[in-house]
Image (cartoon, grey):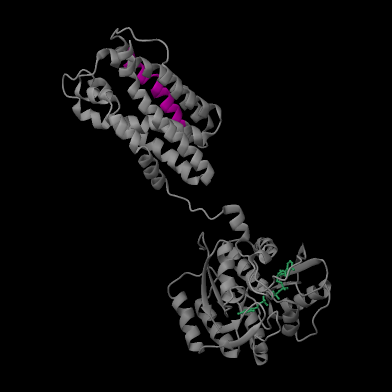
Amino acid sequence: MSAVVPRVLSIAGTDPTGGAGVQADLKSIAANGGYGMAAVTALVAQNTHGVRSVYRPPTSFLAEQLHAVSDDVSIDAVKIGMLADVEVIETVREWLAAARPPVVVLDPVMVSTSGHRLLDPGAEEALRLLLPDADLVTPNVPELAILLDREPASDGDAVVDQAQELARRHGVRVLAKGGHLEGPDLRDALVEPDGRVSDYRSPRIETRNTHGTGCSLSSAIATRRGAGATWSDATDLALRWLSESIRHGSALDVGGGHGPVSHFAGLWARGGLDTMPSPDEIADEWWRSTAGVRDAIDGLDFIRSLGDGTLDRRAFAWYLAQDALYLREYSRVLAQASRLAPTPREQTFWITGAHAAVATEMALHEQWLGLGEGVPAQASPTTTAYLDHLGAAADSGDYERLVAAVLPCYWLYHDVGSRLHPLGVEGHPYRDWLDTYAAPEFAEATRTAIGIVTAAAAGAAPLRRAVMAEAFRASAAHELAFWRAPLDAVAAR
Ligand SMILES: Nc1ncnc2c1ncn2[C@@H]1O[C@H](COP(=O)(O)OP(=O)(O)O)[C@@H](O)[C@H]1O
Ligand SMILES: Cc1ncc(COP(=O)(O)O)c(N)n1
């Protein structure tokens, strides 16, 4: 079973400038959605101008690296690059026989772009013997010729002929790469062991940044295949990614010779570098952003006297009348959230809230309206302002903004309600009210609302998340004004 994120091992040499070898492989694996690992065959002192020297550590140590990985990690794919000499080839072959990784892509690295040997001339036959252990071999034009012991092909058809010959001889799939041929059009050919050919054509990109293209391509194919794509799809996806990365290579400005490709250019452009907060982090941040509003609510005479039961009945009746006006409209706003909801679960949640707002709570308020304190039938300026804010969010058709705007009505009410509730002793004049907003169903609905809204915010792009946070904060400020209004209104009469 391959993992969602395929675990891909590169067995290759190094490039301290990061454009080729294991350094390029790890970037390519990551850029194609894999988890990259690397066992180093040889240390190469090289840069974008060329190779200066090669140090090949004892192969016993390579074997230790390989077994350290396979003893611990389930490997989904292996990419093999520079093998340096016969001893290294033998070490890798023995390890492959023992570890049996499900996908093996072999890039038969022999000579660097700059013309330096990365494989002993005497190791060519050993490399040929390794070919059947691979699922895919990815030679460039000169490597294909050496593996066949022929002259290099000079056009696309000759490359395909040679690739078919190699595939047949060794019973292996071959991706023959056309980067070394001349001309404006590039052709790579995937040849099955039975000779069937799939062509991949693309325009040649005018650039000096082609250092490590072979390393990067083979790692990308191994990763895509390790994730479950067919060989043909894996090749197609990897080539599209490589073209994009070659196109952005020169913008990196790395070195004065053949520079690297820009492995993450596409991801940077499309995904940006922003981190994504978790829903819990958003909940914390948004809640903290209302600290001032909450302190101010707690400090209101209305809240204090509501808690100890000394609140002026007229003020309470005025408040209930405004709340009834508010709830009718709030119900419509929740119904709009339900209409825009992306999932049935959310659709159900908001429509249930809309029903609760208009039915259950209205019924409670009907009783209190019986207080007969000559309450206003018109929405106050404060109520109107709050409803205008919610109405604008509802009319925008923007689900995320809308649900962020309706959240404080749950969250702050639940917060105030659960703190006032213990004060609602026998005989408390506002006990029914105190019970409503501390009820377990309201606590549950509040939790669900917070979960839905913060999950939407976590998944939103940063700018969208900022719009949501602003809608939330504005509603919280309207909540404060709503609680402050009743005593002011009664005092002004
Ligand atoms: N200038 C370029 N424009 C577009 N694709 C390129 C360019 N150079 C190389 N490639 C692609 O990069 C891959 C590796 O190319 P190639 O040069 O043939 O192999 P290697 O890097 O092993 O020598 C191939 O898929 C090739 O099509
Ligand atoms: C360690 C190592 N492996 C492979 C290459 C081939 O790179 P290129 O794709 O430029 O031929 C390289 N230069 N160094």
- Of 181 and 299, the residue lying toward us: 299
State the quadrant of the C terminus.
Answer: top left
Is residue 440 visible from the viewing direction of this image?
no
Q: Nearer the viewer, residue 363 or 420?
A: 420
On screen, residue 451 versus residue 125, left or right, reads left
Number of residue marks: 0
Q: Nearer the viewer, residue 466 or 430?
A: 466
Residue 27 in view (yes/no): yes
The residue lying at 52 percent from left, 81 percent from top is 95
The main secondary structure of the magenta stretch is: helix
Q: Is residue 363 magenta?
A: yes
- Res 304 quadrant in image: top left
Q: Which residues are magenta?
A: 348-366
* 418, above or below 237, in the image: above
Residue 216, compared with residue 377, is above or below; it is: below
Where's residue 288, x and y in %?
Answer: 35, 42
The vertical placement of 85 against 377, above or below, is below
Q: Using the rendered view, name the quadrant where residue 18 is placed.
A: bottom right
